[in-house]
Image (cartoon, rainbow, N blue to C red):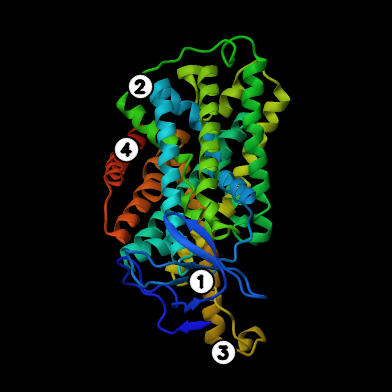
Amino acid sequence: MQIDPTGPRSRGRETTPLLRKAASFTVSSQPRSVRVGHVNYKSTSLPGTPSILTQTSSPASPGTVVQHHYGGKSTYGQTLFNCIAVLLGIGMLSEPLAFAYAGWFWGTALIIFFGVVTCYTAKLLAREILLDPRLRSYADIGRKAFGPKSSLLTNSLFCLELFSLSVVLVTLAADSLHGVWPAHSANTYKLFSVFVLAPTTFMSLSILSLTSLLGISSTLLIIAVIFIDGFSKPDSPGSIWSPAQTSFSPGTPEQVGVAFGLFMAGFSGHVVIPSLARDMIDPSQFNHMANWAFTITTFIYAIIGYAGYLMFGSSVSDEISRDLLATPGYNFTLNQLAMWLLVITPLSKFALSTRPLNTILETMLSLESTPRSHSVEDGKGTTSQKGHQLTKQVFVATERIMVPVMSIAVSVVVPQFSALMAFLGSFSAFVICVIGPISAKIALTGRCQWYDAALLGVSTLMAVWGTFSAFWTA
């Protein structure tokens, strides 16, 4: 075994080292060829050591050898399940309204287009994360492509997306609770929810992670309830057997713009794509897994949109769950159960969804937790050390309480669920899921393919159109 102390050279236009450069290894054992994206890898194993992926040199980078060592533990099936679980979420409740705004033809075309494009950009992120073992996250890719100054922009976009999601969760929980218990207004429930949400922001991740199973279960139940109700009711409204009045043509320009955001919001899971790719036992299977994950997700969103649009037509609400509860002739107990899950799930997922937001804010404000010295822990620290630690804890507590308070305040000011989802999809999802990955690819390769330029142009137009429409209809 020979060790090259100089390490690999940086690829593309990278000017900022992310991690320490790893040494290159040359192994004489017979390798097994593996392909990741368009790059050939050789997988070699030494006795008693894990597999090592080594990138072979290419014409574009002569003599470059990069050592890759992935400690992934997720199988193909586990990664597929996790990817679908990330993509499927509360955005499905607005799919019928998106079809009502876009019409049958353009609604179908848009949801397929967004599914294909986001699958493509997910593969771009996975390819970059697998080519460079120093990269760990979406933010690392952005920092490598655009330099260290991009970190502030990336963190700001993440904060905006996560905060928008927190507002959506508050709105959904309050609207659902008002549907099953209309004794008070939705805004009243929002105000009282601070007493539930604020304490959860201090819970440990081991407790909060249990809410993921509840979220997946409620999602599957809502899908089942929609079709059980639709097929069990013989007459309109709310029946698949007797469809409501629908249209093949789109609505007003503002409605079409909102439809862009509603469709796109369902595919906004690219922040975790790098983690999923690195955690695979065999990363070369990621592209195949992504094809299935996005195909299944697109199909589920499409049939939910079709069913809801057939059942309620152009009068469908921005949350189809409210239509199910308000329409007579359904199984009352089943719908009540589904609505209570839509109350509990957003409240339980709030702290888990906003934990990355808290982490980013605490880092930007220099409030991140640091190991305490033994002198402070045993009470022998100076008064200034204890005072500084206490002050930091007070600021952290204030910041974590202010996140739900601000989320509730925005939800009260902007109560429309569709407007919130449209903004989440039109601005955040387009920028993070489409514009960002394609721009990073162009910056790292130094080339812009015609289809990348076309996707950037179309996505930017849709993002601007959808964002203005979301504000206009709010």
SS type, badge 1: loop
**On the image, which quarter does residue 147 sit in?**
bottom left
Residue 367 placement (x, y as % from top left): 49, 71
Q: Is residue 128 above or below residue 315?
A: below
Residue type indicated by callout 3: Thr
- The circle on residue 251 is 2
Q: Disc 4 marks which residue?
A: 462
Q: Disc 1 marks which residue?
A: 368
Circle 2 Cα neighbour tier, 10 Å, few/some/many (<14 / 14–19 / ≥20): some
Pointer 2 or 3: first along the chain? 2
Residue type indicated by callout 4: Met
Number of the front mark, 1 or 3: 1
Contact (CB < 8 A) between labels 1 and 3?
no
The C terminus appears in which quarter of the rendering? top left
Q: CA distance from mark 1 to mark 3?
A: 21 Å
Residue 465 placement (x, y as % from top left): 30, 36
Pointer 1 or 4: first along the chain? 1
